[in-house]
Image (cartoon, helix red, strand yellow):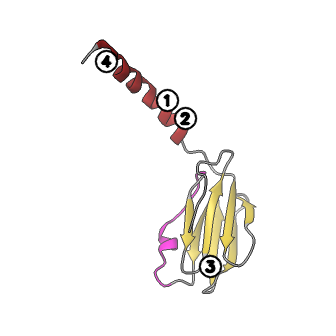
Amino acid sequence: MTRADWALLLALLVSLPWLYLHFWSNEPGQQLVILTETGPPRILPLYPDQELHIQGTLGDSTIRIEQGRARFTASACSNKVCIQRGWIAETGETSACLPNRVSIQILGRDARYDAVNF
């Protein structure tokens, strides 16, 4: 290895922590977006605590907002993966009940992803 190779390797090792903190740090969310197949998106603040009943294609999904985080607590789907996902609280996190066509996403000051598809 030449001196230039060592210099490049050192520059990469020094810049990696900064790159990680700058591009992949998670910030607490500020709003919750609820998407359904049939209606327009609903944007709600993560405070105050509340429980929402959202109608999906299979039936009712229950979403709990508590202490700046959100989760599915009940759904009409059969496998309940959306409930097992648990709490989401950081910008960009998503939870979805695909059979019932209901999804939730946390929004913050900066969007971390270009798009979320399902």
The total number of labels drawn is: 4
Distance from the alpha carbon under mark 3 to that under mark 1: 41 Å
Q: Where is residue 71 in the image (x, y as percent from the top left)?
A: 58, 66
Distance from the alpha carbon under mark 1 to that under mark 2: 6 Å
| Residue at image point 36% right, 16% down | 7
The amino acid at mark 4 is: Trp
> For the residue labelled by badge 4, is the local secondary structure a helix, a strand or a loop?
helix
In the picture shown, does residue 21 fall above or below 42? above
Q: Name the residue under label 3.
A: 61
- On the rendered image, what quadrant is the C terminus found in? bottom right
In the picture shown, does residue 97 fall above or below 90? below
The amino acid at mark 1 is: Trp
Distance from the alpha carbon under mark 2 to that under mark 3: 36 Å
| Residue at image point 54% right, 80% down | 99
Q: Mark 1 points at which residue?
A: 18
Check whether the beta carbons of the residues at disc 1 and disc 2 lie within 8 A of each other. yes
- Left or right? Give the position of 92 relative to 20: right
The amino acid at mark 3 is: Ser
Report the front residue among 12 and 5: 5
The amino acid at mark 2 is: His
| Residue at image point 62% right, 74% down | 102
Which of discs 4 and 1 lies nearer the camera? The answer is 4
Distance from the alpha carbon under mark 3 to that under mark 4: 56 Å
Residue 22 numbered tag: 2
Q: Earlier in the sequence, mark 3 or mark 4?
A: 4
- Left or right? Give the position of 114 relative to 14: right
Q: Mark 4 points at which residue?
A: 6
> For the residue labelled by badge 2, is the local secondary structure a helix, a strand or a loop?
helix
Q: Give the range drawn in magenta.
A: 78-91
> For the residue labelled by badge 1, is the local secondary structure a helix, a strand or a loop?
helix
Distance from the alpha carbon under mark 2 to that under mark 4: 25 Å
